[in-house]
Image (spheres, rainbow, N blue to C red):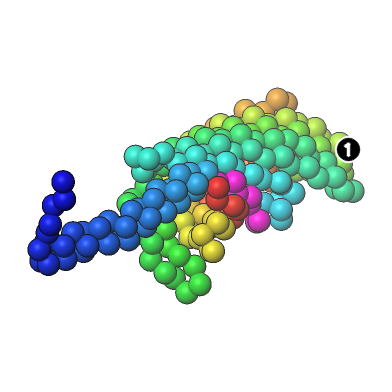
Amino acid sequence: MFVFLNGKTMKKIIILLSTFMIAYPANSQDTDNEKNYLNEIRGGFFQFFFNTFYLEYEHCFRNNTGLVLQGAVTLKKDSYEEIFGGQGGLQYRVYTSRIGHDFLILRFENAYLGPYFKYRFLDVTDLDGAYVDDIWQDGEIKNAYNTFSGGILVGFKLSLLERIAFDFNIGGGVQFTDEKNANVPDYTLDMFGVAYTGVIPTANCTFGIRF
């Protein structure tokens, strides 16, 4: 049995079908992009200037949150000192909704806020001596430092060509350091020294691949 439709009804059906066919692939593409870009591997550039190789992995969840795992290795040996150590960290992020605003050749993706926790250990040897309690001590001074820190950071993400990610953040927290030996060189007690305990700022810039 055939059903004959008038011109207006046919026109409405064609418009509805056309709209559905256009909208469905776009929706599928957005879903695929979100699915494919839930993970990022990023490296730190500025850490190289501090004799450190730094990497982090992030997994983003569908509810606008993310979890970041951090790892780093520090290695230095010259005529003045020897340093070896490692670092591990964890961040939890709460993201704003996807913004997708173009910024020059980059795209501003979204901003975030969240807590962080880090642990670091360093073995440091001063080969030519150092000041300890304002008194110069000759010879090698060896010590090991275990540092725990945590706080809050805020940041934002940029992307280039969809797959290349840039991450920037800044914040602050509290740091506690435990020394193995009593001989702690004075220079290590500065805010950015390896033996510092107290309130400390933090900032980071990383770049990598989204997948």
Using residue 100 as the reference point, say whether residue 77 is left or right of it. Answer: right
Q: Position of residue 125 (x, y in %)?
A: 81, 37
Span colored in magenta: 40-46
Comparing 83 with 47, the one in front is 47
Q: Position of residue 209 (x, y in %)?
A: 59, 52
* Magenta region, main secondary structure: strand
Comparing 89 with 137, the one in front is 89
Which residue has dot 1 on it?
A: 139
Residue 189 falls in image quadrant: top right
Using residue 141 as the reference point, say whether residue 65 is left or right of it. Answer: left
Name which residue type carries label 1.
Gly
- Residue 198 in magenta stretch: no
Comparing 70 with 186, the one in front is 70
157 lies above or below 148? below
20 lies above or below 122? below
Query: Which residue is drawn at the image coordinates 37% and 57% (left, top)?
Result: 26
Query: Which residue is drawn at the image coordinates 60% and 49% (left, top)?
Result: 42
In this orientation, does residue 22 appear? Answer: yes
132 lies above or below 19? above
Query: Which residue is drawn at the image coordinates 45% and 65% (left, top)?
Result: 107
> Residue farthest to the front?
1
41 lies above or below 109? above
Q: Position of residue 161 (x, y in %)?
A: 54, 64
Q: Dot 1: within a 10 Å radius of its alpha carbon, few (fewer than 14), some, or many (20 or more) residues?
A: few
- Residue 44 in magenta stretch: yes
Q: Secondary structure at mark 1?
A: loop
In this orientation, does residue 175 appear? Answer: no
